[in-house]
Image (cartoon, rainbow, N blue to C red):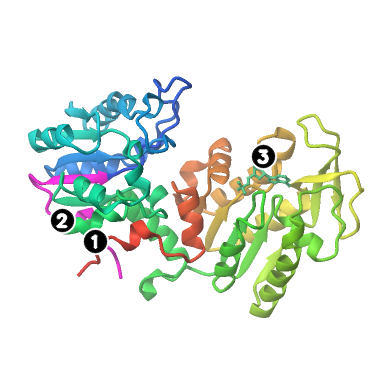
Amino acid sequence: MPKLSIRDLDLKNKHVLIRVDFNVPLSEDGSEITDDTRIRETLPTIRYALEHKAKLILASHLGRPKGKPNGKYSLRPVVDRLRLLLDHSIGEKINVAFAPDCVGEIAEELSRQLESGQVLLLENLRFHPEEEANDPAFAKKLASLCEIYVNDAFGTAHRAHASTEGITHHVKQAAAGLLMEKELNYLGRALGLGDSATVPAKPFISILGGAKVSDKIGVIENLLGKVDALLIGGGMAYTFLKAKGQNIGKSLVEADKVELAGEMLRKAEAKGVRFLLPTDHVLADRFAPDAATQIFSGTGDFPAEWMALDIGPETVKTFAAEIAGASTIVWNGPMGVFELPKFAAGTTAVAHAVADNKGAVTVVGGGDSVAAVQQAGVASEISHISTGGGASLEFLEGKKLPGVEALTEKS
Ligand code: AMP
């Protein structure tokens, strides 16, 4: 059942509390925002609410203050940046006030004083242990600030916290913000959720990489029932190659997952899903930026002391051809140790191949693959870049996200 959207509601003169994700990286002393992407991502929702004359309250967490006030994790530096971004985006000065605590008398008074088209940013929700404990009394206090609740923080939707789940029990309407809606549309469509119009176009492929098989097992299991092919790279590929009997030298392996990896391979075969593993590799004599390297191809034993740190050129070619022929592509996780230039070629090539397929719906999630498409300069050519690493993985695993489930259904 689709969820209520902010676009379905009459916001005029109403106190609207938006749970945003302003968990931005700060400088060491906590005074400077070093990357404001997360604030920018939610600007369309904020702008929408202001244009529709809401009295806007913004709530977020920042970092891990562990339930205690801590100046290092204050959201205060966000006020100026938000003013600046709103000024650029709307073209007029917006009044942004700051409440030094997210609940209590001051927050309530500042909220009462809000006029339509004004903004109140609340201090870090996680200065209260009740936020992560999803304490009902705390959730009720937050809810008392507003008439309408909107969740635009997809990145924390996999957590049942007071501001993402608890609060929805104390408001009449809980709706998805524009960013949340976009995330659910793209990821939901890839999983074939919703009506038949949202079935992913075939061929549907998923490219999975990153360090560990254990992190992606749930995703592989869920996608096996949906995709035409899985393309596996990164450290996780070597547990699969080991399961196939290849000696992988000093490459990353999760010994306790080899059996499970073998099971996945058999399941894929039974379901007719093509399971593509790297057929050649960039081997290194040690894990270092200046390591000696060699290309190794085939199914024979790796030289005993060497480790695979990237997919090789032949694999890049195979993967690029698969990507070029697909109509829906979901990518999560790098193909190698892309942080080191010597081992970045595979990931960069995949980023370009995904971006070059202009006819496909392309969805990229997970911090590292997002960084890779940004590094490759092709971010704007991807249909959707997911803002929630953990949340998008859980969604792809087929799990219900508490912050999404709790939203009001469209009637
Ligand atoms: P994850 O957090 O699971 O998405 O994994 C990302 C990390 O996996 C990155 O820091 C990569 O450097 C690392 N990685 C990717 N491929 C390999 C590999 N072949 N060997 C070791 N680490 C890898």
* Residue 34 rendering spot, x and y as whole percentages: 45, 26
Which region shows up in magenta? 1-18
Residue that label 2 marks: 9
Tell me where residue 114 sits by quadrant. top left
Front residue of 161/69: it is 69
30 relative to 117, above or below: above
* Amino acid at the residue labelled 2: Leu
Q: Is residue 26 left or right of residue 311?
A: left
Report if the beta carbon of the residue with label 3 is closer than 8 angstroms to ligand 1: yes
Q: Secondary structure at mark 1?
A: loop
- Callout 1, which amino acid? Leu
Instruction: Describe the element under mark 3 as helix, strand or loop.
Output: loop
Q: Residue at x 89, y 51 (%)?
A: 302
Pair 1/3: label in front: 1
**Residue at the spot 20% in from the left edge and 29% down from the top edge:** 96
The verdict on residue 12 being magenta is yes
Give the percent coordinates (x, y) of residue 306. 87, 44
- Residue under pointer 1: 4
